[in-house]
Image (cartoon, rainbow, N blue to C red):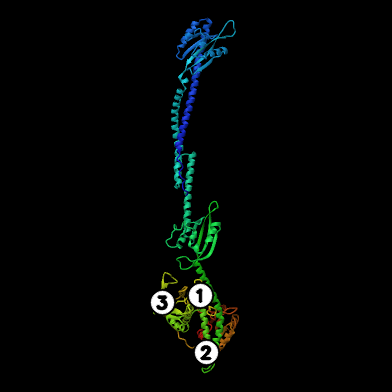
Amino acid sequence: MTDRPDKAPRIPSVSAAIALLTLFSGILFAFIIAGVSYWMQRMDDTRDLQTRAQQTSDQLSYIVEVLLNKGDLNSVQRIVENITTDRGIFFIAIVDADLTVLASSQHDLLGASISEYRGNPQLFGEFRRVMTHGKTEFIHHPDRAHFEIVAPITLSSSSRTQPFVSGAVTVAFKDDPLIWNPQENFWKHLQLALALTAFAIAILYGILRRWVTSPLERLTRASERLGSGELGIQIPVSSSNEIGRLTETFNWMSASLSTQRRALQASEERYLRIFHSSPLCLIVVDSAGTIVDVNATFLAEMAPATDRDSWTGKSVMEVPFIIAGNLGAEVQQLLGSAIPVERWKVAASFPGKEHRSFFNFTGIPLFDSEKKMSGAVFAAKDITTEQTLEAQLVQSQKMESLGVLAGGVAHDFNNILTGILGYASLLKMRLAADDPSLQPVEVIEKSGLRARALVQQLMGFARRTGAIKVPVGVNSLILEVVPLLERGIGQGVVIRTELDPTSPKIMADSGQIHQALMNLCINARDALPPEGGTIWMKTQLQRLPSRSDPDREEEWVVVIIEDTGSGIPPDVLPRIFDPFFTTKEVGKGTGLGLSVTYGIMKEHGGELAVHSEVGKGSTFTLLFPKTQKVSDWKETDRQEVVLQGESRKILLVDDEKSLLELGRKVLEERSFQVVTAENGEKALELYRKEGREIRLVILDLLMPGLGGWQTYAKLREINPKVKVLFSSGYGGTKEMEEMLGQHACLKKPYRIQELLSAVEKMIG
């Protein structure tokens, strides 16, 4: 709402203005009425006096005419004297044709010329005009306070056919005060007019007050309250005239403004809720770049104890992430040209924060109603978490891709190893104990077993094969690793241990854990300076939040490997678990050590974390969950398998011809009848022909064309009770275990005894 303007100079109210106007109009009207009334009365009185004077002169002329015809001048004089007794008549004179006074109210004029009358020097001339023209004249002499009438006297004669003017008569009247005192008469009329006007003004003012000024005053007071922000005011409508309609319009406007204010307040509240609850850091600035407002997310990202007032009024160039991200040019571009700006994945380190942050930065201009830029809004979104998750996803996808590659390689390699181990075992069984060829065969078998272990480690990294887990003490494994490291780790390197004697055993593949510890220690050794350093190997038992329920704690076995080496740079740290990534010189590292360790920990349901600072060394932490399986586990004894086929028939299905030949020879030596098939289609054809005689089908899972699982499904259509021993050199046993369920599976590469043991379980 806009501020009220300064008060204008005080002017009379409408009531006062109407009262003054009415008073002025009344006075003017009174003067007009008084003047008109006086003028009309004077005209009436003047007409009355003229009539009276005319009657008097007419009577006197008639009498004088009669008496003059008789020559009786004395009677004329007596009549004049009698008429003069009227207080209103102060002079009468009768003259003959020569203007000689025949009779007069003044005796000294008798017989003299009328020109000798001093009371009115113009009387002589007046008589002459009347005598000449024969017409009566009425003359007013205000300077002498009288008026007079001069009338001709006509006489008849026997010698004349028409009367002739033989003289004239004049009658002079005194001034009537009502007529000839205009000032006094006017004020009398004015007083009367003012009295009547005052009464009329009072009535008119009351009417105006009731129907005009009071409603206007109510409207004025209500308008002032409305202007001060008090909306929703309603005024009673007292009439249906213009003021009543104006009042109705005011009431509608007040109600409309109140509704609009409520809508505006609701809109403002929604804006503030959105503004302050937005996950973006929002900054509103004016056209000069001065901060007008910031939201709660921005304040939460800034230094502690900052509030909105501490930022408003500052330049937007003082905002930390604008400074740290070198965004000044973008801000100036927006403020100068009103062009929106965008910057993605801006990296910046903020004071008080340990790690570097990433954020997206945008800015949009704001315009007023005249399409002029009035300011701008800048937004920054912290995407550090998203970047971390993205990196983890990329890492996971890399591991998955490598796992697929490793699984495919392992499948073919396991087929080769199966032939090597199988034929080595077969030769070993056929050779006598003193045969000189026995030792080379045993070397071949051991090499094959080592190759199998290597493939299993590769599958452990790729998480394509399940580890063979038994109760393992991590303290014992560390004590086994230390001597190996001390013999070949180099001069100046000291290995220290700090083992928790209460640390329990875990369910793990000892070979894989042994490999993981060796990889981490070798990696630590390579990070030490040429003069040497220290490697710590520690074990602890800690209670940490459960991965399935963060509110619940569970026990974890912790293995810590620390070094005093050079540390890992921040830009390298996110990539250390990438397969084949290494910072070592060519020929000094393959980039698989940490990747294999990462896969081993995931295979065991554990976690692998790293913390490193340049110049201060690195710390790798291995977390193993403590489970009840350790106490429930019991090792089963292994026995030599002695198996006789008794002419029972077995269908052997594999796409590797060498494995088919190996299986045939081994099983036929145990008195089995063996039929072979190179693919699923051939296997189905043989089973349809000889299915009643076949006691067992040894089926390779991965074959070109019709695969092992599809072949098994079609075999069940022929014989729902068919017995199948699956065989696979592919490492994806987790997925296959879900697919196979309780079905038996012989993992490649296998030795003769392992093949015979599996067959015995299926047939026996």
Q: State whether residue 77 is above or below residue 634.
A: above
Q: Where residue 379 sits in the image (x, y, percent)?
A: 51, 60
Q: Residues within 10 Å of mark 1 (few under 14, many from 20)?
A: many
Q: Residues within 10 Å of mark 3 (few under 14, many from 20)?
A: some
Is there any visible trace of residue 670 in the rendered image?
no
Q: Are marks 1 and 2 in contact (CB under 8 Å)?
A: no
Task: Classify mark 2: helix, strand or loop.
Answer: helix
Is there any visible trace of residue 482 in the rendered image?
yes
Q: What amino acid does circle 3 point to? A: Gln
Task: Classify mark 1: helix, strand or loop.
Answer: loop
Q: Nearer the viewer, residue 399 or 372?
A: 372
Task: Classify mark 3: helix, strand or loop.
Answer: strand
Q: Which residue is label 1 attached to?
A: 577
Give the number of the disc on residue 540.
3
In the image, 68: left or right of 196?
A: right
Q: What amino acid does circle 2 point to? A: Glu
Q: Where residue 723 sits in the image (x, y, percent)?
A: 53, 82
Q: Which residue is label 2 attached to?
A: 442
Q: CA distance from mark 2 to mark 3?
A: 42 Å
